[in-house]
Image: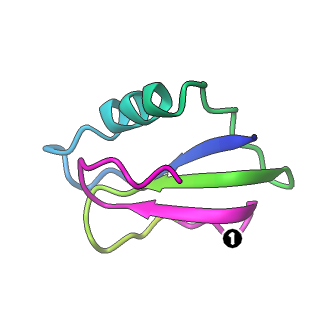
Amino acid sequence: MRCAVKYCGGCNPRFDRRQLALRLEAALGMPFESLRAGEHYDVLYVICGCTARCADVSAYRADRIVLLDGPELPPLA
């Protein structure tokens, strides 16, 4: 399975987006691939610092895009 992560602009300094990505990688049991425009991913995790969810994902293709705007891990099924 090909998974990658995209981060928002980081307007909320109190939310550690990288820490969530590390926890998510550990829960999945595999590291994220480097995100590249034009590549296709099974899942693209978009980690946002707030509910505005401003991260632009228009240059990326994925079967499933999961938007995260808090420290909770998403369902992995």
Q: Label 1 belongs to which residue? A: 58
Q: Position of residue 15 (x, y in %)?
A: 20, 45
Quadrant in the picture for the N terminus: top right
Quadrant of residue 18 within the rendered picture: top left
Residue stretch rendered in magenta on the structure: 56-77
Label 1: few (<14), some or many (≥20) within 10 Å? Answer: few
**Is residue 2 placed above or below 29 in the rendered structure?**
below
Q: Position of residue 9 (x, y in %)?
A: 39, 54
Q: Position of residue 21 (x, y in %)?
A: 42, 36
Using the image as rendered, state which of residue 8 and residue 75 is in the foreground. 75
Colour mapping used in the image = rainbow
Q: Position of residue 25 (x, y in %)?
A: 49, 30
Using the image as rendered, state which of residue 13 and residue 1 is in the foreground. 1
Residue projecting furthest to the left: 14
The residue at the point 85 percent across, 50 percent down is: 39
Report whether 3 appears left or right of 19: right
Q: Main secondary structure of the magenta part?
A: loop
The residue at the point 36 percent across, 57 percent down is: 48
Q: Amino acid at mark 1?
A: Ser
- Total residue callouts: 1
The residue at the point 31 percent across, 30 percent down is: 19
Q: Is residue 74 magenta?
A: yes
Q: Is residue 17 magenta?
A: no
The residue at the point 18 percent across, 44 percent down is: 13
